[in-house]
Image (cartoon, helix red, strand yellow):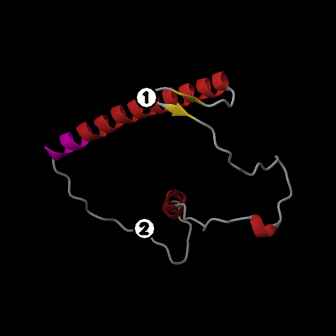
Amino acid sequence: NLEADEKALADQIKTFTVRKNAAKNKRESLKSYLANFLNGAKWQNSEVAISWRKSESVEVEEGAAIPEQYLRYKEPEINKAQLKADLKAGTVVYGCQLVTKNNIQVK
């Protein structure tokens, strides 16, 4: 049955997600260990070479007054759960209505 297949695949995704996160955490831990151990020095052997490169990033202090030209804003998003609850409670919201649909259910 397709619902069982869907559930099995969802469980498999959860299992792989846990394994992926564990591998990512281990990689980050080993990378941090090497960074502390090597302290900026190059190292290599016949299988791997470890070197360093410079990078730049911007750090913004908490509460800094950033000029408007550097700010980005997200588009507003409709909170449909709150809208549905208010419509059910009798609130009139122009352009919105509750619609009852029939959804097929296969067991």
**Type of the residue with mark 1:** Glu
Q: Is 1 in front, or is 15?
A: 15
Image quarter for residue 16? top left
What numbered label is drawn on residue 98? 2
- Asked if disc 2 and disc 1 are in contact, CB closer than 8 Å, the reply is no
- Kindly report the secondary structure that dominates the magenta region of the rendered protein: helix
In the rendered image, residue 52, in percent from the top left (x then y), is placed at 63, 38
Judged from the image, the secondary structure of the residue bearing numbered disc 1 is: loop
Residue in the image at 80% along x and 68% along y: 68
**Type of the residue with mark 2:** Leu
Which sits earlier in the primary sequence, circle 2 or circle 1?
A: 1
What numbered label is drawn on residue 15? none
In the rendered image, residue 82, in percent from the top left (x then y), is placed at 54, 58
Circle nearer the viewer, 2 or 1: 1
Q: Which residues are magenta?
A: 1-7
Name the residue tied to disc 1. 47
Residue in the image at 86% along x and 58% along y: 65
Q: Is 99 in front, or is 66?
A: 66
Are there few (<14), some (14-19), or many (20+) residues within 10 Å of tag 2?
Answer: few
Image quarter for residue 67? bottom right
Q: Is residue 27 magenta?
A: no
Q: Is 107 in front, or is 58?
A: 58
User: How many numbered discs sit on the rendered protein?
Assistant: 2
Q: Is 9 in front, or is 69?
A: 69
In the rendered image, residue 32, in percent from the top left (x then y), is placed at 61, 28
Check the image and report above or below for 96 versus 35: below
